[in-house]
Amino acid sequence: MSESLQKVAGDKMRNILSAMTSNRFLGVLTGVLITAVIQSSSATTVMVVSFVNAGLLNLVQSVGVIMGANVGTTFTAWLISILGFKVKISAFALPLIGICFPLLFSKNNLRKSWGELVIGFALVFLGLDFLKDAVPDIKNNPEILAFLQTYADNGYWSTLLFMAIGTLLTIIIQSSSATMALTLVMCNNGWISFDLAAAMVLGENIGTTITANLAAMVGNVSAKRAARIHLLFNIIGVIWVLAIFPFFLKSIDKVMLSTSGHSPFNHVGSIPIALSIFHSVFNVMNVLLLVGLAPLFVKLATRMVKDTGEEEEFKLQHINIGTVSTSELGIIQGKKEIELYATRVNKMFKKVENLFDESKSKKVDKLWGKIEKYEQAHDALELDIAQYLGQLTEGELSDLGARRVHAMYKAISEIESISDSCFNVAKTLLRKRENKLIFSNEMQANIHHMFTLLQEAFDVMHNNLEKGYEQANLEKALAAEAGINKFRDKLKNEHLLALEKKSYHTLTGVIYNDIFSECEKLGDYIINVTEAIVEIDTK
């Protein structure tokens, strides 16, 4: 269901998040809606961490969405409480699956995704029904109840214990919504009392923060801080509720008595609704109490995760964050990483330019060392990005998403080839230096002009990568590449004439020819990046 929802509305969810402003209340609403739709606060917070990592949201903006995600996840409890235990929705599950199954074979991708969505929805309740029927019968298995009772009569320690159980279950299952469903089933079958179930719900709120924090481990400093904000928000919420826990439960009890006439403390049937009220009221109150403290959360997270100032020149910045269930949404992270990859290769090219102009041995050695480091790092980065794209293809992708990933594969291959060409030019420059060859002023001016043309092509490529798949300017890229080819042809003709006239030494001519010829190849790789992006709109 989660996969199909992302295919149906993945771009819309991405646009909502990326268009977030500093209005934290709008952020809360966004978090509520997205989590209610995709039925996973963990997925929402991982998305938020990913977008903070990608620079699409700042930390203050992320706070609202994270808080809203906690409220949105309460939708699961209400859905199960109202429908799962009252209406025999599982009776409609198989007919729904039967009706929508043919849609899976539709050539229309949107129709196919809607079929997957309805089938996924039906399977949720079919699975819930199986779960209810499969749990042991308490009447015939009193030892289960006795086992729970051993730990249920220790007062406040029991509350803390069951809160820890809720945390552990959520960490293992990696979904607070799934753990909530399990808690409701346990209550419905009389396994645990209302107060212990409420303690488990508090634990689930802490456990759900683990996913985002695990995801942020390989992210940048901002991503780690966003994950810590999620952890802080939920822990602080649990602390203040624990301080008034008995009074809070009594208030829920009064509400249930006045509305249904049954107390969740002595009537098992009323526990699911009472637990849903507890879950919702707790999360809504937590947001209302803490939403105004967003800047404080940012300060605390900043203190928790220090910016070490370590060089991250050759580390992935935007990817390896996210889960298999967010393949569509992960595309934007891949796009951002490829933009950064191209920027790094451009930096390498500028080092090559500097190497051409440098005459001091120490500086030449230093520049060559950096260029070598860039070359090795770029090979590794290509592999890492390719592996990430492979992970995306393991998840469910729309037809457009699949084409975009295919374009990304081609783009990173071409960018790595640009890096190889830069390295080849640098090696040729070292040969020039080792052989103590000197270029004439005209030859130097020509190479400088070729470098200028290449930088213009780089700028167009960067602009196209930044604009994305639907706004890439192929004409400008082709014009830049044509300028490089035209100038290369001019240099080649002049070079052949100079060799005939013996205007310069043969080895000097060979090195000179190797440099501008390799530069022309570099220009070919640059245009190929734009062509890979444009292919999406032409297929």
Image: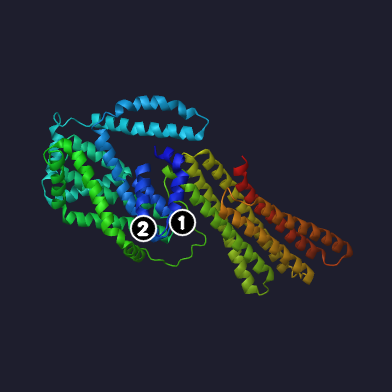
Measuring from the top left, give residue 457's x and y in whole percent.
Answer: 66, 58
Question: In front here: 118 or 432?
Answer: 118
Which residue bears the numbered disc 2? 24
- Residue 158 in the figure: left or right of residue 509: left
Coloration mode: rainbow
SS for dot 1: loop
Q: Residue at x 41, y 25 (%)?
A: 99
Q: Residue at x 77, y 57 (%)?
A: 486
Q: Residue furthest bottom?
A: 360
Q: Residue at x 43, y 44 (%)?
A: 326
Do the residues under discs 1 and 2 have CB atoms within 8 angstroms?
A: no
Give the mark nearer the N terminus: 1 vs 2: 2
Measuring from the top left, give residue 529's x and y in whole percent.
Answer: 62, 51
The image's mark for residue 56 is 1
Badge count: 2
Real-space CA distance between mark 1 and mark 2, rounded to the nearest whole angstrom: 15 Å
- Residue 114 in the figure: left or right of residue 177: right
The answer to whether residue 224 of the structure is visible from this angle is no
SS for dot 2: helix
Q: Amino acid at mark 1?
A: Leu
Q: Amino acid at mark 2?
A: Arg
Tell me the quarter of the image containing the N terminus. Answer: top left
- Residue 417 in the figure: left or right of residue 282: right
Tell me the quarter of the image containing the C terminus. Answer: top right
